[in-house]
Amino acid sequence: MISKIKQKGSILVFSVMILTILLTISITLAKVFIPKIRVATEAVNSVSAIFAADTGIEWCLYTFRHDINYAKPNMTNSAINYYSVYKGSDPIELSMTPFCGPEVVPMPSFRSVGTYAGISRSMEIYKSEN
């Protein structure tokens, strides 16, 4: 028969081993699943960003075709639009010129970047020279 004196502390050692194993498993699972959760969240934000970019392109096309100078679209979901207009390969400075109206003739290439929650998506309409 083994005396109780020799077994003192064995429960403590066993508990520490079990906790170490559980902690290792938890950290491994966190390393696997946290990036997947982040990707799923960014996919939702990506949809909002692409819709913001699409809105910018549609606005540019509409104001260019209808000779109307409407105000820029205002996104209710806090998405941000950046617009660029290109003649050839040089972007037009947007802060100085009306960049989507018919005064930019002939029709240039439009580029719109929508940003939502740190995710940016871009759309571009390129007019070929043919």
Image (cartoon, rainbow, N blue to C red):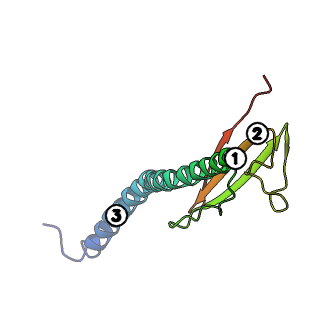
The residue nearer to you, when weighing 118 against 75, is 75
Label 2 – label 1 distance at C-alpha: 8 Å
State if disc 1 and disc 2 touch (CB < 8 Å): yes
2 or 1: tag closer to the N-terminus: 1
In the rendered view of the protein, which quadrant contains the C terminus? top right
Disc 2 residue type (three-letter):
Met
- Residue type, numbered disc 3: Met
Q: Upstream in the sequence, badge 1 or badge 3?
A: 3
Please name the residue shown 23% across and 77% down the image.
5
Asked whether, in this view, residue 33 is left or right of residue 76, the answer is left
Considering depth in this image, is 22 or 41 the residue closer to the camera?
41
Q: Spatial distance from mark 1 to mark 3, Cα to Cα?
A: 70 Å
Query: What numbered label is drawn on residue 64?
Result: 1
Residue 85 is tagged as: none
Q: Out of 82 and 100, give the one closest to the viewer.
A: 100
Q: Determine whether label 2 and label 3 are within 8 Å by CB.
A: no
Please state which of the two labelled residues, at mark 2 or mark 3, is closer to the viewer.
2
Residue that mark 3 sits on: 17
Look at mark 2 in the image and give the residue it sits on: 107
Taking the spot 74% from the left edge, 32% from the top edge, the residue there is 127
